[in-house]
Image (cartoon, rainbow, N blue to C red):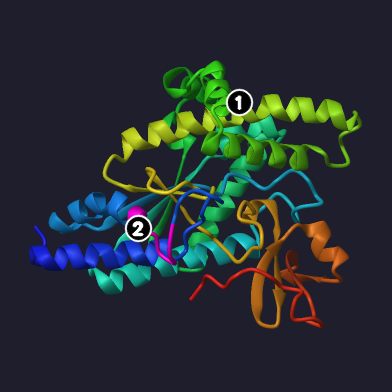
Amino acid sequence: MSDLAAPDIELVSVQVLREVLSHQRRMRGGGCTGDVCPQCVRHHLDTVRSAMESGRRIEFVLPAFPTKSPNPAKVLGPLPDLAEELALRFLNQLCERITELYPPGAAILICSDGRVFNDLLGVSDENVTGYARALDAMITRIGAGHLEQFTLDDVYSNAGHEDMRTMLAAGYAPTIEELREEVRGGGAPLAMYRGITRFMLEDLSGPHYTGTRSALQRKCRELAYRVIQRSRAWGDLLDRLFPTAVRLSIHPQPCGTEKIGILLADTPDAWLTPWHSVAVESGGRFTLMKRAEAEQAGARQAFTEGRPSHYVLEPADPTTITGEHHDR
């Protein structure tokens, strides 16, 4: 049981959610209002309040950090780099700030979905494994004690990788036709479909692709449904495994839904993530950019322990770096 009185639990619950929602990744036209949306606070209040009433730590589930994009025009390589490290530090610091408000603390379970759909992206299972292991090592190295990683391998530990994906889809995935019907209805499903299609087109249009642009567009529109189908299955499984957790998302979310979209870094693009970009330092601040765009802007590559880590851009123009600063 909690040591807090009921009025205090209510107050601290709101404070915790305001802290999280101050980094909210919002869907354009999604209905949120104010710097911190009061409707989103109310929507998740019961979950946070329940954790506090029982005196347990507040748990968050974040499907994220799948694997690096296979397109070398977007990233430095297949392993996590400073872009991921900055995001992990931000998430851990967010939990530390929550712990100052509520001493039992908070933890974020990073539910890596790389194994869920890497075959659709043309990324090998070996690269997914290497990325996940390197991410675990990074969490340990930076002392991010509030973070832990959970993968499809933890669910189906004795199965082959392809069998894991088959069992996940068979047990939890909606049909493609159900998804098509949702997308035809417009709104958030259509925005999600368009966002995933755009990412698929970028990821698969690297130097290895030799077909026509129109053929790739058709392929990506079909693949987007399968990515969403698998992601929905993964999300449904996580909801069943972690029913008392607050659900976070790296995608922009409409107002007052079961997920809170959260920004992991400064970026002018609300869809850009560390695994689709590089970290660029300019004037002591970091933002995310696609690798090709960073190089076109004149940024130079920086190294850590002999491996490419990020880019440095001399701030000749104060408008060079855009986006809000979220890591307070």
As helix, strand or loop, the secondary structure at mark 2 comes to strand
Residue 52 rendering spot, x and y as whole percentages: 18, 58
Quadrant showing the N terminus = bottom left
- In the depicted structure, whether residue 52 falls above or below residue 30: below
Q: Amino acid at mark 2?
A: Ala
Q: Is residue 172 magenta?
A: no
On the image, which quarter does residue 32 sit in?
A: bottom left
Residue 202 rendering spot, x and y as whole percentages: 76, 42
Q: Amino acid at mark 1?
A: Arg
Q: Where are the magenta residues, as a range?
A: 33-40
Front residue (pair 297, 144): 297
Question: In this rendering, which labeled residue sits more in front, label 1 or label 2?
Answer: 1
Q: Earlier in the sequence, mark 1 or mark 2?
A: 2
Mark 2 surroundings within 10 Å by alpha-carbon count, few (fewer than 14), some (14 through 19), many (20 or more): many
Q: Which residue is mark 1?
A: 226
Residue 269 rendering spot, x and y as whole percentages: 66, 57
Q: Which mark is residue 156?
A: none
Q: Which residue is mark 2?
A: 107
Q: Is residue 55 left or right of residue 234?
A: left
